[in-house]
Image: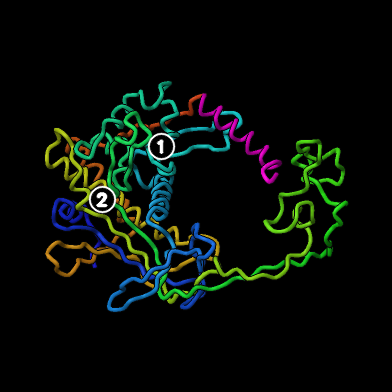
Amino acid sequence: MTELTYERLRDAVSGGAVALRSILRLQPTDGEGGKVFPPTYDVPNTAEHKYAVEERQIGDRVSTTVLLDSVASQANRAELALLEGWEADELAFPVPFVDFSGEEGVNDLGRLTVLEAPHRLADAIFRDSLLDGTLFRLSDIGKAITDAQPRNAAAMFRYAPTGLLFGQWDSTGPKGGLGAKFQRAYVSEVVGLDAKIGTKVRSRIDPLQIEKLPADQIAYNHSDPGQVWTFESHDAVQLKGGKPEPASRGSESGTAGQPSKINHGNIAPSIDGLAGGVTISSARQTTVISFAALRRLKFANASREAAVAARAAVAALGVAAIAYSYEMDLDLRSRCLLVPVHPLSAELVLRDGSEPQAVGIGRATSAELVERAAREAAAAGLGWATDEIRLVPAPKLVELLRRSREVSAREDVTEAA
């Protein structure tokens, strides 16, 4: 297997291949047949479990599969992998961000980048922030982003190329639902094979052996959140009619005012069959970068050479996302850590049905690809912005954050009531 070169990637993007594909076989950390915990979903009370399970054709057999990480979740993880490379100064590409660090009361948010915002550069966080003292959408860059379309993606490429890779719908901009939609070219997901739904148990033994309280001696929610609870009715949160509010912020089960509501007492052993995890024989991560999708991107007034170079640069970011994600490991959530059973590899999928061409795509190789691709695109007349794109939150956004935090603090006390 030879390393993927820029020339080979450019030729593939220009029409020599349909896609680049990486298929990674994985195992739970405790080995074949290990137990993992998939994401749960809202289901009817009559459902057998809370997981996304379906039958899939895997090679020459049908397997019961369970979704371990969705396309959207994988895209977010890939963006964070690119962010890690950008922050390490290994990958150089435009990353607009909103800087909250100078705003009193919300400075704990630090810096929020386009790789972390849910709707990328079209997110309301950017819309409600200032670029050089001007609301983003009214700035030159913001106007260019608003006017960008798949038939003229030059502004998106210049200021936020990852939006062309992972997709973006400008649904909160001036055009509302008619805002530009950029198809995602990077699609990845992780599924577990031969899934068997399991159960989990829970219980707690209270070393203090605190028992249930009589109805006339219950605990109340304290009016001071820091105090949590009290037996004194005059210190409690007052309900309508002047009655103290029974303690209600502990476990989901139990009666208000009882020890379980202030995190004391025993929890009787129970079995959870709705979200009790699954055992799997193995897992499979499939990642595809669609060159067909990239070829649909047009760049008005740009030469064919420039358009090919721009598409190749976006593809190079996708290759880097695969390579950097591999080195960040697949710790998907609590009790769902997966490990590869072979080194990372990829293949170019050809349109004539012939055998895919294997290529190497390591971390160092992908970083070189991004650097070379950016240089070639700039030389052809479609360069990335090189100056920092730093925004600050508008005063109204800061005030919204502060008010929301005040409400959240109050709801910690009153929500259960």
- Check residue 3 for magenta coloring: no
Q: How many callouts does the rendering have?
A: 2
The quadrant of the rendering that contains the N terminus is bottom left
User: 53 or 317: which is nearer to us?
Assistant: 53
Circle 1 Cα neighbour tier, 10 Å, few/some/many (<14 / 14–19 / ≥20): some
- The residue drawn where x is 20% and y is 43% is 297
Please tell me which residue is depicted at 39% across the width and 27% down the height of the picture: 136
Q: Is residue 204 above or below residue 194?
A: above
Compute the Cα span from label 2 to label 1. 23 Å
Q: In this view of the protein, which residue sits in the foreground, 4 or 43?
A: 43
Which region is colored magenta?
396-417
**Magenta-span inclusion, residue 412:** yes
Q: Is residue 231 left or right of residue 145?
A: right
Residue 222 quadrant:
top right
**Residue at x 33%, y 41% (from the top left corner):** 169
Instruction: Work out whether mark 2 precedes mark 1 in sequence or the reverse, and give the earlier one.
Output: 1
Quadrant of the snapshot with the C terminus: top right
Q: How many C-alpha atoms fall within 10 Å of the one at disc 2: few (<14), some, or many (≥20)?
A: many
Residue 130 image position (x, y, % from top left): 43, 25
Question: Residue 2, how many percent across, how many down?
Answer: 23, 64
**Horizontal side of residue 180 vs 240, given as left or right:** left
**Mark 1, secondary structure of its residue:** loop
Q: Please, what is the dominant secondary structure of the magenta stretch? A: helix
The residue indicated by pointer 1 is: 123
Position of residue 155 relative to residue 325, above or below, is above
Q: Amino acid at mark 2?
A: Ala
Q: From the image, tell me which residue sits under label 2.
A: 315
